[in-house]
Structure formats: structure tokens, C-alpha cells
Image (cartoon, grey):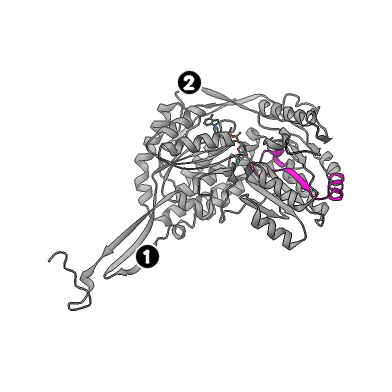
């Protein structure tokens, strides 16, 4: 049994609220640790520390901030296995998946080494007689990041890296389900040379989040999590005059055209639908085959692949396909939704409702499920299940298929599998979804592009990482200056303001 507290002013700081939450081992259901839940006073104190430290960090030249990022990349690589192990222990995902979680976060830190380039301003020479005009990007001050449980390394690194590189101090509020890795990340940043007080990790739940949203010092809030909480945080942060970017849930459709390579499409669907137990905001949860023949062929190819999936704890080796879901409540919710699918008339082609793993009967394992003949009025179609459940919605035409994806309230990611360039191009241009894959099932943009969904998957104007992050975490100041003394006596312009 271990305890996770906070990290304030570069020191592990014991929580004083007296409230703690259980950290579960999702493979066994046992309580393996406790995490401190901060109250408003603890959050306010951490924000004050950040506010004192930020001006010096913000005034540092950006190359020096970039060098901290460079050192951090080295440390993340050095501790990759240690971070992955801690991540799998609390989250339950496989070790290769956990390493991927750290790796995708690390790539954003790599991108942040380029802070001097990203923060370069604009200059207009001779905007008027003796007049020059320039714009600079300045840090906001103290910003906050609120993270979900499903990527406890990647998302905190995405949120924190650009904010720090821009010269802000940051309050990081990790998920209370798997708080160890964000704390380890903060310790690594301190080792990388980040000055004291620039990155605080404050653990907690709604009380800690509300303290962030109501604190006047916090200038911007980045949130990633479920849509109802994203909407709540976005509206409360904005009402309190803060900048906010809040990313929510998803229901990602993959369209399979009759000309697609069906083996490639089936492999892609199995990886994207069941990897990480479906607990990815970019997971494919809806397959839309176009035409009866395509649908029949696809189902025929999917079933044996899904039946072969190995569901086990990460400790069982690298050939495990996926592990448990995060909590008993998540497992119950997934099984309840599967039952509604059956009750509402969908065809459960792969049924693992009675799945039990010997020796891990109290763990939160859910076997893989495949539905066919799902319709858009069913709960399993409308709701984000966030589990190992793939729904097949059959479409007769491409227009019908694209219409399903367009009409769904979520707009995070989508994909099309086809060999036809015209169809692929039309799909990419018309679809009202933020991230699009063409024969790529999980089109997560790399660090130097931006990540963000549309519709109810994202609230706010700017995306995560890439150039947008450098805009989100800075504000523009524009200076107009007049230096007439440089003009020769008798020149075109003579400045008389002080005459
Ligand atoms: P969640 O919304 O339950 O929690 C996210 C964060 O919000 C946590 O830090 C939690 O402590 C806090 N929180 C929870 N309830 C709150 C409340 N009532 N008031 C204030 N704060 C609260 O999400 P989760 O279960 O941790 O993560 C899974 C969700 O995140 C899924 O919906 C998934 O699609 C989404 N997600 C989205 C993206 C994206 O980029 N769009 C990425 C990853 C995950």
C-alpha cells in the first residue's frame, strides 16, 4: 500500500485535507494505494507558489526553457520502463501500450524544444514615417491542466509541455484513478532543471477542480475528459474570464468501402476497437461497411480475429492484447450498455458477457464484443461506451455512411478504408470531424500538428499541441513605436511633438 500526495515548489507535499481516495489495481480489484484529495485552501496555496515563481521563468530567454525540455526528453527516455510499469500498474494497459503512452507525450516535449522558433514575433518596418510595429507573444501567467485517467503520461505531457515552454507556471490536476505517473513526470521536470514552483501537481476531485476554476490567478484551463465535465469546466472557466480548451468524449466511425482491402480493414478495426480495452478517445467504436457484401465479408473476417484476442493482466507478457477497464463501475456500465444493445434488437455476434479470467475474478476484465445490425436510435450507438465493444452499422451507400458520422453528436476522429482517391478526398473535405484517417484507423496527429475534435468532442478555439498550443498559452502584445531622431534634418519627415 502506498500513498500519493502533491508536488508543490518541487517538493512532495503531504495533503492536509484529511480526504483520500483509493487507487485500485484494476486487474485484481484490490486497493493498492491512496491518493490525497486537495481542498480549496491547498489548491489556493499551490497557485500562490506558482504565481510567485512564474515571472522569472517567463522572463527567461526561450532557448533556456527549450534546454529544460531537451533534458526532459533525455530523462523520459531514461525512465521509460519505470514510467510504463507504474502506468500499467494503475491503469491496467499492456506494457507496450504504456510505453506508447509515454512516447507520444515525449514527442510533444521534443517539439517544445523549438520554443524560440514558435515564440518568434512579427515586425513591420516603416509602418508610417519613422514608425515601426511589432508583435510579441508573452506568457499568460499561471495556467492549469486537468487530465483524464486513460493516458496518464501522454495527456499531462501534452498539456504541461507547451504551457511551460511558453513561460507559464502550471497547476496539474491528474486523474485520481492513476496519479503516480503525473507525479513522476513533475519530479523529472525538476531534475531536468525546471525552477522550483513552476510545475505543481495537486491531486484531487471536483473540489480541487472547482478551486482552480474560481481562482482569479489562473489565466487558462486545459481539460481532457468526458463531455459533460468538459462542458461544465468550459462554461465555468469562461464565465470566470479564463481562457479554456476542453476536450470531451467520442464515438469514432470507420467507413469500409466495397473496394477496401478487407483483411487490412479487419486488422485495423480490431486494433482500433479493442486496443487498450477500447478506453481511447480515438478508438473506433462504430464500423460502417458500405453494401451488404462488404458487411458480410467484414463480419466474417472480424469474428475469428476478435475471438483470438488475449485479455489478461499486463504482467502476463507482451502478447496480451488488452487488460482490464479502469473501475468496477466502468465494467458494470459497459455490461449494462451491452445488455441494452441486445434488448433493443442489435445482433451480438461475439458475446463475452460471462467472461471471467481465472485467478482474477475480482478484476475489471471485460471480454471483447461485436454487434451487427446496430441502428442509430440504439443506446449503444448514441453513447460513448469506452470499452471493448465494436458496433456495426450497415449502410447501403457511401452517402448514407458519411451521413451517420456527420449526424453523430461527437466529432473527435473518423476513418475511411478505400482504394478510391476521389472517395477518400471527398470524405476528408466534407466530414465535420476534427481528425480524419484515410486507410489509417487511429489518425492521431503528430506533435507538430494539432490534436482536437469538433462538435461535442471539443470546446474552445485552439487545439492541443502543435502551433495552436503556443497560441493558446501566450497572448499577443503589439507595440507601435516612433523613432524620428534617426531622420536627417531637412528629410521628408520632421518630428515636432516636443517642440
Ligand atoms: P472524467 O470526465 O470523468 O474525468 C476527467 C477529469 O475531470 C479528472 O481529472 C476528474 O478528476 C475530473 N472530474 C471528474 N468529475 C468532475 C466534476 N464533476 N467536476 C469537476 N471535475 C471533475 O473523464 P475520465 O473518465 O477520466 O476519462 C475518460 C473520458 O475522457 C472519455 O470520455 C474519453 O473520451 C475522454 N477523453 C477525451 C480525449 C480527447 O482528446 N478528446 C482524450 C482522452 C480522453
Residue 250 in picture, x, y percent from top left: 64, 41
> Viewed as shown, does residue 244 lie left or right of 324?
left
Based on the displayed image, in which of its 4 quarters is residue 424 positioned? Answer: bottom right
Decide: few, some or many residues near mark 1? Use Cα within 10 Å; few <14, some 14-19, many ≥20: some
Magenta part of the protein: which range?
275-300
Residue 429 in picture, x, y percent from top left: 64, 57
> Viewed as shown, does residue 55 lie left or right of 333?
left
Whether residues under marks 2 and 1 lie with C-beta atoms below 8 angstroms apart, the answer is no
Q: Is residue 85 magenta?
A: no
Per the image, the residue denoted by label 1 is: 123
Residue 400 in picture, x, y percent from top left: 75, 49
**Quadrant location of the C terminus?**
bottom left
The answer to whether 38 is drawn above or below residue 188 in the figure is above
> Viewed as shown, does residue 458 lie left or right of 270?
left
Along the line of sight, the residue nearer the viewer: 12 or 351: 351
Q: Secondary structure at mark 1?
A: strand
**Quadrant location of the N terminus?**
top right
Q: Residue at x 26, y 70 (%)?
A: 130
Per the image, the residue denoted by label 2 is: 18
Q: Residue at x 83, y 44 (%)?
A: 302
Q: How many marks?
A: 2
The answer to whether 299 is drawn above or below residue 496 in the figure is above
Of label 2 and label 1, which has the lower sequence position?
A: 2
Whether the residue carrying mark 1 lies under 8 Å from ligand 1 is answered with no
Say which of marks 2 and 1 sits in front: 1
Image region (quadrant) for ligand 1: top right
Decide: few, some or many residues near mark 2? Use Cα within 10 Å; few <14, some 14-19, many ≥20: few
Amino acid at each position: 500500500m502506498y500513498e500519493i500526495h502533491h508536488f508543490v515548489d518541487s517538493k512532495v507535499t503531504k495533503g492536509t485535507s484529511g480526504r483520500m481516495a483509493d487507487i485500485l489495481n484494476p486487474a485484481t480489484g484490490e486497493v493498492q494505494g491512496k491518493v490525497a484529495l486537495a481542498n480549496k485552501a491547498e489548491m489556493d496555496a499551490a497557485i500562490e507558489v506558482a504565481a510567485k515563481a512564474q515571472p522569472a521563468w517567463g522572463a527567461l530567454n526561450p532557448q533556456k526553457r527549450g534546454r529544460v525540455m531537451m533534458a526532459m526528453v533525455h530523462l523520459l527516455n531514461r525512465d521509460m520502463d519505470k514510467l510504463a510499469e507504474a502506468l500499467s500498474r494503475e491503469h491496467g494497459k499492456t506494457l507496450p501500450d504504456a510505453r506508447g503512452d509515454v512516447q507520444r507525450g515525449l514527442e510533444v516535449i521534443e517539439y517544445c524544444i523549438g520554443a524560440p522558433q514558435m515564440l518568434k514575433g512579427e515586425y513591420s518596418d516603416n509602418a508610417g514615417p519613422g514608425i515601426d510595429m511589432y508583435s510579441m507573444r508573452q506568457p499568460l501567467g499561471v495556467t492549469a491542466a486537468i487530465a483524464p485517467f486513460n493516458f496518464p503520461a501522454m495527456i499531462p505531457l501534452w498539456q504541461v509541455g507547451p504551457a511551460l515552454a511558453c513561460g507559464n507556471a502550471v497547476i496539474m490536476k491528474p486523474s485520481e484513478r492513476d496519479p503516480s505517473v503525473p507525479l513522476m513526470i513533475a519530479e523529472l521536470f525538476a531534475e531536468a532543471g525546471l525552477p522550483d514552483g513552476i510545475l505543481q501537481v495537486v491531486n484531487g476531485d471536483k473540489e480541487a477542480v472547482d478551486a482552480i476554476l474560481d481562482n482569479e490567478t489562473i489565466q487558462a484551463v486545459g481539460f481532457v475528459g468526458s463531455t459533460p465535465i468538459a462542458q461544465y469546466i468550459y462554461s465555468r472557466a469562461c464565465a470566470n474570464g479564463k481562457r479554456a480548451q476542453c476536450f470531451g468524449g467520442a464515438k469514432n466511425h470507420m467507413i469500409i468501402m466495397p473496394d477496401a482491402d478487407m483483411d487490412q480493414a479487419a486488422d485495423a478495426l480490431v486494433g482500433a476497437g479493442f486496443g487498450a480495452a477500447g478506453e481511447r478517445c480515438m478508438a473506433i467504436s462504430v464500423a460502417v461497411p458500405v453494401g451488404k457484401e462488404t458487411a458480410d465479408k467484414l463480419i466474417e473476417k472480424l469474428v475469428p480475429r476478435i475471438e483470438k484476442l488475449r485479455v489478461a493482466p499486463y504482467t502476463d507478457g507482451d502478447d496480451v492484447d488488452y487488460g482490464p477497464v479502469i473501475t468496477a463501475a466502468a465494467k458494470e456500465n459497459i455490461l449494462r450498455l451491452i445488455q441494452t444493445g441486445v434488448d433493443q434488437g442489435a445482433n451480438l455476434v461475439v458475446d463475452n458477457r460471462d467472461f471471467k479470467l481465472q485467478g482474477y475474478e475480482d478484476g475489471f476484465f471485460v471480454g471483447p464484443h461485436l454487434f451487427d445490425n446496430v441502428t442509430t436510435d440504439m443506446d449503444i450507438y448514441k453513447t460513448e461506451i469506452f470499452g471493448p465493444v465494436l458496433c456495426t452499422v450497415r449502410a447501403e451507400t457511401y452517402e448514407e455512411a458519411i451521413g451517420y458520422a456527420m449526424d453523430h453528436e461527437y466529432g473527435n476522429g473518423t476513418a475511411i478504408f478505400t482504394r478510391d482517391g476521389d472517395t477518400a478526398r471527398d470524405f476528408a473535405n466534407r466530414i465535420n470531424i476534427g481528425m480524419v484517417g484515410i486507410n489509417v484507423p487511429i489518425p492521431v496527429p503528430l506533435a507538430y500538428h494539432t490534436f482536437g475534435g469538433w462538435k461535442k468532442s471539443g470546446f474552445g478555439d485552439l487545439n492541443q499541441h502543435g502551433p495552436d498550443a503556443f497560441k493558446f498559452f501566450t497572448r499577443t502584445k503589439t507595440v507601435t513605436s516612433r523613432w524620428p531622431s534617426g531622420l536627417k534634418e531637412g528629410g521628408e519627415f520632421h518630428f515636432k511633438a516636443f517642440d
